[in-house]
Amino acid sequence: MGHFQTLRPARSPQEHCPPRALLPLALSALARPGSLLLCSVLLAPVLAACAPPQVSLTAGPGSYEPSDYKRVQSRWTREESLTSIEELDNVLTATATFESPDFLSAYLVRTTHDYRLPPLSSEEARKRAQEEAGSDHHFYVALYAQRQKDGDLLAENPAFVVHLVDDQGHEVAPSAVTHLRKVTARERAYFPYTTPFRTVYRLTFPARTPEGNALLSPGTRWFGLRFSGAQGQMTVTWQVEP
């Protein structure tokens, strides 16, 4: 097909990785026969410098101050790109934040502070975060496609479909896909990778598979959003603490 998933791991968009400039050189090298060793050398510093932190699915919401939001948002955010070797360009880039109870705890504390609402105690923030997370799994996702229509997940014949996957072999379609057509200052402030050039969605997935198996259980070692289509596939991945 002439496409492949980039070899770098999914990154937080807030992390700055100087070696990333080597990626086009590595892709060009990979396209030439007999250059696998050179490609490995070029990609090695990228892999070393940009490894994202692991997340916990069992620790529950943390206790945070408003100034902690950026750090927590970065922890729960990943980015991945599907790249064309032939054109040395991105077909699709997805940046996603998993709205876990831990993330929502920091989000509630920060928004309460910013909008001058009555302050929440740590216990109140954790309790509300658990309530807002509910029993489903929610993701805030911003897509950038080389062809804008390729980022339309609600098209009649979409270029890509998305599933929640994990290391247990589960692959589940979203129960709801909400297109945020009018992005506000709130989204731009709290999800800084939101731009006018991206298509923004909130994805909701059930807590269990149709067979009744739990998704994102304590035994999960990794999970991700897999975007699949005729142009290839990529997985935005969160590694989980053992």
Image: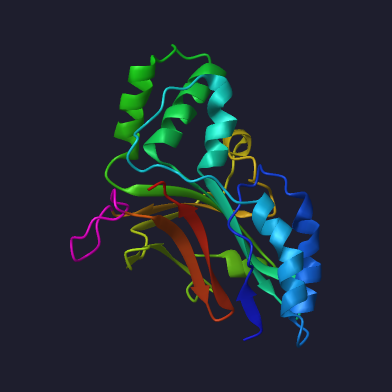
Q: Along the horizontal axis of the image, is 53 left or right of 189?
A: left
Asked if one can make out residue 65 in the rendered structure from this viewpoint, the answer is: yes
Seen from the viewer's position, the closer of residues 22 and 135 is: 22
**Residue 17 is a magenta residue:** no
**Residue 212 is a magenta residue:** yes
Q: Identify the residue at horizontal 21%, vertical 60% (top origin).
A: 213
Q: Position of residue 94 (x, y in %)?
A: 58, 58
Q: Position of residue 124 (x, y in %)?
A: 34, 19
Seen from the viewer's position, the closer of residues 6 and 121 is: 6
Q: Identify the residue at horizontal 60%, vertical 51% (top origin).
A: 51
Q: Identify the residue at horizontal 68%, vertical 47% (top origin).
A: 195
Chain part drawn in magenta: 207-219
Q: Along the horizontal axis of the image, is 151 left or right of 101?
A: right
**In the rendered image, the vertical position of residue 230 relative to residue 198, given as above or below:** below
Q: Quadrant of residue 26?
A: bottom right
**In the rendered image, the vertical position of residue 185 relative to residue 139, given as above or below:** above
Q: Quadrant of residue 150?
A: bottom right
Q: Along the horizontal axis of the image, is 90 left or right of 60?
A: right
Seen from the viewer's position, the closer of residues 132 and 220 is: 220
Q: Position of residue 105 (x, y in %)?
A: 42, 29
Q: Position of residue 128 (x, y in %)?
A: 33, 27
Dominant secondary structure of the magenta stretch?
Answer: loop
